[in-house]
Amino acid sequence: MAAALAALRVGFGVQLFERAPEVRAAGNILNLWPPPQKVLKLIGVDTDDLGAPCHAYFHNAKGRLRADVRLPDEVVAEYGGGFIGLLRSGLYNRMLDAVPPGVLRLGRDVARIDDHGDGVRLTFSDGAVEEADVVIGADGINSFVRRQLWGEEPIRRQFLHLVGGYLFLDEAPEGVGILSHDRTTQVSYTPIRHEGKWGYEWWVLEAFRPDDPLPTDLVEFCRVRARGFPQRVRDLIEATPPEHMQRWEIRDRPPLKQWSKGRVTLVGDAAHPTSPYAAYGAGMSIEDGYFLARELDAIDVRDAAAVAGALQRYEDRRKPHTFKVTQGAYFTGRMFHHLPAPLRPLRDFVFDHTPFLQKMVGDDMPVHILSQLAEIEDAEPFVPVHKRMKEAAE
Ligand SMILES: Cc1cc2nc3c(=O)[nH]c(=O)nc-3n(C[C@H](O)[C@H](O)[C@H](O)COP(=O)(O)OP(=O)(O)OC[C@H]3O[C@@H](n4cnc5c(N)ncnc54)[C@H](O)[C@@H]3O)c2cc1C
């Protein structure tokens, strides 16, 4: 949706093909860093009161501070904290509201792509055919478009899984998120804001063995693992309705050397699936769409060589950033959950008594976030035509 909105903003005609028969958020909890928030605003998404402000801290399970994720005051003031906490469905609804009628085509499963030089022919599983100047594969970790361009490659199973949940509260939470780890497990929470309601999201994350049975009782799974963690997060888990809890296995793929070919490229998880350890996969998908549209806007899309050049410039810009985030998230997950048992006390001593973690997640990550923010133009937010007409009618 972000790629479509960004392309609409610069004047392209866009069709967004989704194979599902309806738009439904796959998942619940979400955090967004400032750069995707800036892009969303630019491409016409209403970001007002989109999520709960959150200043994030890393703690050990006993509550000892290990890192403070510090962003400059002016960024915190403009983007509501280090990052914001929200529900995925809330973001989808805001984005859908910005998508003009007729752009999103549901129940359209892309089954074949033929780049014939002058354009690209899309064939759907029901046999229907569409033509386009450029095709953007925004089709997630199991991307069909990626497979067709670059062949089949196995998904990287990290043997980590998490249970995430959320609950609503009557009062505004304090704008603080605590990400805590003990020797094997992460138990974390951040505030959320969803359609005018305050609340919290939380997650319990740890390694599993391939032959472990899947947890059947998610409440009990979390309760047992959170035992050694502060009362605050245990209370949140206890107060969460079971239907607000979900389990995911964490998977990604090693970085892809080349994303684009001819008139076809990839964005988001199709290009660089990202472990939730970064809290940035959706954010980077949003950014990708924006940077891609900017490159396409600068050329004549009828010219195949110009399209190939624009797609290459787009991916060359995006690869260092997405590489750093996806690999950083992968190795952070390994460091916290897959280190051999004898090394864990040493790791935790370093995290508790040296500035290592502060430097890594408290200082370096914000610097990286700010570098992304600076790459996004400062411009008036785009108002899609259907919203302009609606506003005029009101
Ligand atoms: C537990 C968990 C927590 C996370 N937390 C965060 C977070 O806090 N912050 C953050 O930024 N990210 C987070 N992420 C990552 C984020 O969810 C993903 O990076 C993001 O959803 C990727 O978006 P996407 O649009 O690229 O792909 P997807 O969201 O996977 O969307 C792909 C779409 O393509 C459609 N599709 C697939 N194949 C076809 C086809 N052949 N034809 C037509 N349509 C097709 C699918 O139906 C789907 O709708 C988290 C992920 C998980 C699992």
Image (tube, grey):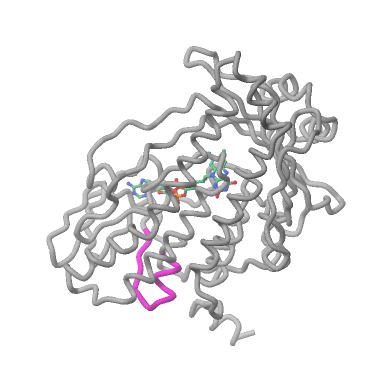
Location of residue 322 in the rendering, given as x and y in whole percent from the top left corner = 44, 50
Q: Which residue is at 17% across, 73% downward?
A: 303
Q: Is residue 85 above or below residue 293?
A: above
Report the residue at 32% width, 71% height from top.
296
The answer to which quarter of the image holds residue 232 is top right
Residue 175 x/y as whole percent = 79, 52
Residue 20: give x, y in percent of width and height.
42, 47
Residue 380 colored in magenta in the image: no
Query: Is residue 14 covered in magenta?
Result: yes
Q: Give the left or right position of residue 122, taking residue 27 as reference.
A: left
Residue 255 placement, left or right of 41? left
Residue 37 located left or right of residue 309? right
Residue at the (80%, 36%) spot, across then down: 236
Q: In which quarter of the view is residue 293 placed?
A: bottom left
**Where, quadrant-wise, is the C terminus in this rendering?**
bottom right
User: Which residue occupies the foreground of this view, 260 or 6?
Assistant: 260
Q: Is residue 308 positioned above or below 208 on the image?
A: below
Is residue 333 shown left or right of residue 241? Answer: left
Q: Nearer the viewer, residue 111 or 137?
A: 137
Q: Looking at the image, is 215 positioned above or below residue 136? A: above
> Percent x, y for residue 85?
68, 51
**Bounds of the magenta segment:** 4-16
Count the marks: how many? Answer: 0
Image point 37% across, 32% down: which residue?
A: 155
